[in-house]
């Protein structure tokens, strides 16, 4: 069985990143876009990151141009947009496809996982959110309109970060 830690991806700056570097962290993996009606969710993603980073949360942003061509820029343009407009400090990766034959392997794996509240299957739009536990397993999936700081997201993040979760793994 695969985990998030089995994959690699290029950062938005072009460096190869083994996602095993996030082992022991809880990760919220999100396909993002700069010209979408949901783009203001960058603010919520950054607030969530700021609130929980010290406890072990990482937000991983993967720009995607598959939905309405709403991420047309280069990696450099995307990085500048995110940093300038939303103060993004969480890890960002290079632009990927999240659905179809050309889907990045991490997204082929994420969308195959049957989780709640949203189950397995193709991503419907920008800002779909996958919560991955410290062991690299998908524990929840949230639809694009779900705000990053929504109560249901925060409850799942809290549960994944909880020390009792670590004790249960032992």
Image (cartoon, rainbow, N blue to C red):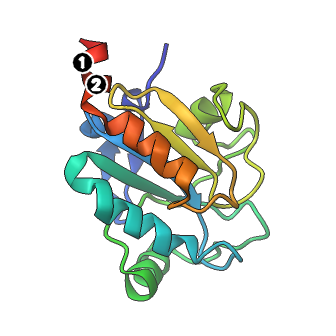
Query: On the image, numbered disc 1 is attached to which residue?
Result: 167
Eyeballing the image, is 82 above or below 165?
below
Residue 110 spot, x, y in % from top left: 59, 34
Can you say which quadrant of the picture contains the C terminus? Answer: top left
Residue at point 30%, 15% (across, down): 169
* Percent coordinates x, y for residue 69 in the rendering: 74, 71
**Pointer 1 local density, CA inside 10 Å: few below 14, some 14–19, many at least 20:** few
Disc 2 crowd, CA 10 A, few/some/many (<14, 14-19, 20+): few
Could you say which quadrant of the image residue 126 lies in? bottom right
Of helix, strand and loop, which one carries label 2?
helix
Query: Taking the image as drawn, is residue 105 in sight?
Result: no
Assess whether mark 2 and mark 1 are in contact (beta carbons under 8 angstroms): yes
Seen in the image, is 94 located left or right of residue 164?
right
- Residue 136 % position (x, y): 39, 29
Q: Residue furthest left?
A: 54
Report x, y in % for residue 162.
Answer: 30, 34
Residue where numbered disc 2 is placed: 164
Q: Residue at x 37, y 57 (%)?
A: 11
Q: Residue at x 53, y 49 (%)?
A: 153
Q: Which residue: 72% across, 44% down?
A: 99
Under circle 1, the secondary element is helix
Q: Taking the image as drawn, is residue 26 in sight?
A: yes
């Amino acid at each position: 069985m695969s985990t998030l830690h089995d994959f690699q991806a290029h950062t938005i700056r072009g460096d190869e990143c083994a996602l095993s570097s996030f082992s022991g962290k809880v990760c919220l993996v999100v396909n993002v876009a700069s010209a979408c009606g949901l783009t203001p969710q960058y603010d919520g993603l950054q607030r969530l990151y700021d609130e929980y980073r010290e406890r072990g949360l990482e937000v991983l942003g993967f720009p995607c141009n598959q939905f309405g061509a709403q991420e047309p820029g280069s990696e450099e343009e995307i990085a500048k947009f995110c940093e300038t407009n939303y103060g993004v400090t969480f890890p960002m990766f290079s632009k990927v496809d999240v659905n179809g034959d050309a889907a990045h392997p991490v997204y082929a794996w994420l969308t195959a996982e049957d989780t709640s509240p949203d189950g397995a299957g193709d991503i419907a739009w920008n800002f779909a959110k996958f919560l991955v536990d410290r062991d690299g397993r998908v524990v929840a999936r949230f639809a694009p309109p779900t705000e990053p700081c929504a109560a249901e997201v925060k409850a799942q993040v809290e549960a994944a970060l909880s020390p009792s979760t670590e004790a249960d793994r032992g």
